[in-house]
């Protein structure tokens, strides 16, 4: 099993800062999972998980947590913290990271 | 000694705490209280966390701490104004007025109206109740939904943070009391219905007081209450009248679809300040809408208006003991200022 480095160097830095700038509401997430419970797509799609992974600096995994997302916005409706989940998904899926690469797979 | 006259508005734990100190220091004290009996929300609860003391007994012993006060029960104060000479004019429901040299506002909080969270089905499905309703059921004042008593293998769900930490209901703040209330009520339900299983859906467990953490452990160890970290996003009713719940187990990253016979919503504490307090007496508010003292550290009972003091949960969610102590602190502050 791969040991993960939680030195936080990449956690809230680098590409995550780019995403934060695009969708500032993402910092309000309390990872309650309401979005995942309400998700229309599948049991594997989770904005909560994506945001948690993002905070650990694990961008590729965060993207994977949204695979299959229909972009329907139901998760935004249930979020208690006013996170613009669609904005987070869009930023994560379509935005360039710090090295200029498009995050989209 | 003093002949100054002090008005206390609200006779919950905080107002009684203030009245006890003021009346024992030779001041003339008038207490104005909306309900017939002193005690505030204590009269709405059955047993208090963390040690299951009967709430009404606490109300009685708090009231017994006061000395001669002029108690006005059933007296909802709908307006107070301040004269140029610094005195307060209090208007009673019958139109009569009373004048006081200083005023302690101890009007408390309001319980969140759960029907505002439509997706949880309160007011739609009879088996969805609030923590406040459950207190009445535990006290025997309101019956439990009848079928529950006979049912085998009862499933009960407890939902935390209803109307708190929730931007949609306009309440960003944490109500502080509902986590431990959830733990307390889970245990009470397990005692009342030994054939039940209780699952509590929480987002963070906030066991801040003495004995709370122990109660949380007891609930899991001795009463097999299952705590699941995740927010309930929807409640619907099945054909058999059971409650279908959608949630996410955020620690396992797995969705939950479960059915319950009873859902108890841990409703939050909201600000309930009268207009006149803000508009006529100049009291400021914190973001959550509660009253703001001059500062949170050394002058939380004082206001920018001379002679006006704040006490208890009108300033934010407090426990009974905290509200009582805060009322006494407000009175002490008032005495210090009077003698200055
Ligand atoms: C479901 C639930 C369960 C709880 N259980 C516990 C527990 O087990 N243990 C614990 O420590 N805490 C518990 N609490 C918290 C507890 O209720 C509060 O700590 C306490 O009631 C605060 O006291 P208070 O005097 O500040 O306000 P309140 O109890 O709200 O009293 C204020 C009083 O002022 C009166 N009033 C307001 N405005 C006016 C006016 N204009 N004129 C006249 N009268 C007025 C009100 O009618 C009220 O009676 C619980 C809270 C909830 C929501
Ligand atoms: S519902 Fe909102 S606060 Fe809760 S995990 Fe999803 S994005 Fe975060
Ligand atoms: S927008 Fe995507 S993540 Fe949100 S509920 Fe719809 S499918 Fe699920
Ligand atoms: S005390 Fe617990 S249930 Fe109440 S608002 Fe805070 S976190 Fe939620």
Image (cartoon, coloured by chain):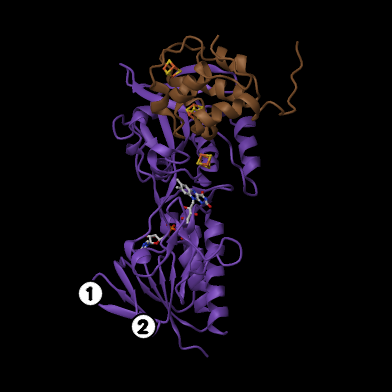
Chain colours: A brown, B purple
Mark 1 neighbour density, 10 Å: few (under 14) some (14–19) many (20 or more): few
Percent position of residue B147, x then y: 35, 27
Judge left or right: residue B195 versus residue B275.
right
Does the CB distance between marks 1 and 2 fall below 8 Å?
Answer: no
Q: Chain of mark 1?
A: B
Share a chain, discs 1 and 2?
yes
Seen at 49% across and 78% down, the residue is B23
Residue that mark 2 sits on: B84
Which image quarter: residue B123?
A: top left
Query: Relative to B275, does residue B172 appear above or below in the rendering?
Result: above
Where residue A39 sits, quadrant-wise, is top left
Image x and y of residue B207, in percent: 61, 42
| Subunit ID for the residue under disc 2 | B
| Residue B200 shows in this picture | no
**Circle 1 is placed at which residue position?**
B95
Mark 1 and mark 2: Cα distance apart in space: 21 Å
Q: Earlier in the sequence, mark 1 or mark 2?
A: 2
Quarter of the figure that contains the C terminus of chain B: bottom right
Q: Residues within 10 Å of mark 2 (few under 14, many from 20)?
A: few
């Amino acid at each position: 099993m791969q040991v993960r480095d939680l030195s936080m160097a990449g956690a809230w830095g680098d590409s995550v800062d780019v995403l934060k700038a695009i969708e500032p509401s993402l910092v309000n997430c309390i990872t309650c999972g309401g979005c995942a419970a309400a998700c229309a797509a599948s049991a594997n799609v989770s904005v909560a998980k994506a945001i948690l992974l993002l905070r650990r600096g694990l961008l590729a995994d965060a993207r994977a947590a949204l695979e299959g997302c229909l972009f329907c916005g139901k998760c935004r409706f249930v979020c208690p913290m006013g996170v613009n989940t669609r904005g987070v998904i869009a930023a994560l899926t379509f935005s360039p990271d710090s090295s200029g690469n498009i995050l989209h797979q | 000694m003093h002949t100054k006259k002090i008005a206390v508005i609200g006779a919950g734990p905080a107002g009684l705490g203030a009245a006890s100190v003021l009346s024992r220091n030779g001041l003339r004290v008038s207490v104005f209280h909306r309900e017939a009996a002193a005690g505030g929300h204590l009269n709405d609860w059955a047993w208090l966390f963390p040690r299951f003391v009967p709430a009404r007994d606490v109300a009685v012993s708090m009231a017994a701490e006061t000395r001669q006060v002029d108690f006005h029960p059933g007296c909802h104060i709908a307006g107070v104004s301040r004269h140029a000479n610094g005195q307060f004019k209090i208007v009673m429901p019958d139109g009569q007025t009373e004048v006081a040299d200083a005023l302690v506002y101890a009007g408390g909080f309001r319980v969140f109206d759960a029907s505002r969270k439509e997706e949880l089905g309160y007011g739609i499905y009879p088996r969805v109740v609030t923590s406040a309703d459950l207190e009445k059921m535990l006290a025997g004042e309101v019956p439990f939904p009848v079928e529950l008593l006979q049912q085998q293998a009862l499933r009960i769900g407890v939902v935390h943070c209803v109307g708190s930490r929730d931007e949609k209901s306009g309440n960003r703040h944490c109500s502080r009391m509902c986590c431990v209330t959830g733990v307390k009520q889970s245990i009470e339900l397990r005692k009342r219905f030994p054939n039940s299983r209780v699952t509590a859906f929480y987002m963070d467990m906030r066991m801040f007081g003495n004995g709370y953490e122990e109660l949380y452990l007891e609930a899991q160890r001795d009463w097999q209450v299952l705590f699941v970290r995740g927010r309930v996003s929807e409640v619907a009713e099945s054909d058999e009248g059971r409650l279908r719940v959608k949630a996410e187990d955020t620690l396992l990253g797995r969705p939950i679809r479960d059915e319950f016979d009873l859902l108890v919503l841990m409703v939050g504490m909201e600000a309930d300040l009268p207009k006149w307090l803000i508009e006529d007496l100049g009291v400021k508010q914190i973001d959550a809408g509660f009253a703001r003292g001059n500062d949170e550290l050394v002058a939380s009972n004082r206001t920018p208006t001379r002679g006006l003091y704040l006490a208890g949960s009108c300033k934010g969610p407090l426990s009974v003991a905290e509200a009582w102590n805060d009322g006494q602190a407000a009175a002490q502050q008032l005495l210090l200022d009077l003698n200055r």
